[in-house]
Image (tube, helix red, strand yellow):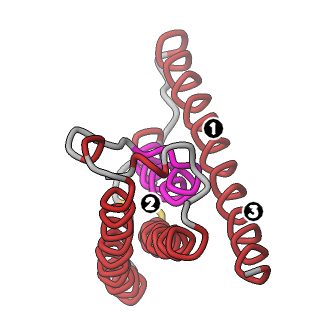
């Protein structure tokens, strides 16, 4: 039990670091877009590659923060049906949902892995005003999906062992 708690804390630190990175990336994209607008408006000289860079940053921002959001119990929850059930049924449905989430995102991560490996093998490039390889972005999508699958599994284990996920709405899970 203590080992699980230590692993969960270490994994949480990893997810927090990735969440921080995603937040910094949001700020960097904001600065790039504002600088591009100013350059375009004042000097009629937009920053080359702004579109391509922001397009590639969005998957990083989204997928690298998914597991962090799950860890913090921040995803949207619909409790229309489960709020009318007893605690045993709510817990059983929460466990089933977490297991299904782990399986679904593990499957998606496997597909993301194949997509990433193929992108690397063919040397896929972003084509536009600037060119750069796309495989790092695709690997980040895979990583985010895999981390989310692991977080769902951790939450399911925590629910089974400790009776809760550590989130504020563990009893209302649907």
Residue holding disc 3: 13
> In this picture, which residue range is highlighted in magenta?
52-75
Residue that label 2 marks: 131
Instruction: Label 3, secondary structure: give it.
Output: helix
Residue 71 in the image: above or below residue 77: below
Label whose residue precedes the other's in the sequence (1 or 2)? 1
Quote the CA–CA distance across marks 1 and 2: 19 Å
The location of residue 169, given as percent across then percent down, is 49, 44
The answer to whether any part of residue 149 appears in the image is yes
Q: Magenta segment, principal secondary structure?
A: helix
As rendered, which of 89 and 139 lies closer to the eye?
A: 89
1 sits left or right of 124 in the view: right
- What residue is shown at x 60% (from left), y 49% (from top)? 22
Q: Where is residue 109 in the image (x, y as percent from the top left)?
A: 37, 77
Tag 1 residue? 28
Q: In this view, does 153 lie above or below 86?
A: below
Label 2: few (<14), some (14–19) or many (≥20) C-alpha neighbours in 10 Å: few
Residue 88 point in image, percent of width and height: 36, 61
Few, some or many residues within 10 Å of mark 3 (<14, 14–19, 20+) = few
Mark nearest the camera among 3 and 2 is: 3
Residue in the image at 53% along x and 58% along y: 64
For label 1, the SS is helix
Q: Does the magenta stretch include residue 108?
A: no
């Amino acid at each position: 039990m203590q080992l699980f708690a230590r692993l969960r804390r270490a994994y949480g630190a990893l997810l927090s670091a990735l969440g921080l990175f995603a937040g910094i990336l949001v700020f960097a994209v904001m600065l790039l877009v504002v600088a591009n607008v100013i350059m375009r408006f004042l000097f009629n000289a937009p920053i080359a590659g702004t579109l391509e860079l922001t397009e590639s940053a969005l998957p990083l921002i989204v997928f690298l923060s998914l597991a962090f959001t799950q860890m913090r119990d921040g995803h949207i929850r619909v409790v229309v049906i489960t709020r009318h059930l007893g605690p045993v049924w709510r817990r059983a449905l929460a466990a089933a949902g977490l297991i299904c989430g782990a399986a679904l995102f593990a499957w998606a991560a496997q597909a993301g892995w194949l997509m990433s490996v193929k992108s690397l093998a063919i040397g896929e490039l972003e084509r536009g005003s600037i060119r750069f390889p796309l495989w790092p972005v695709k690997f980040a999508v895979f990583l985010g999906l895999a981390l989310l699958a692991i977080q769902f599994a951790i939450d399911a284990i925590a629910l089974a062992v400790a009776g809760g996920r550590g989130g504020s709405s563990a009893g209302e899970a649907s």
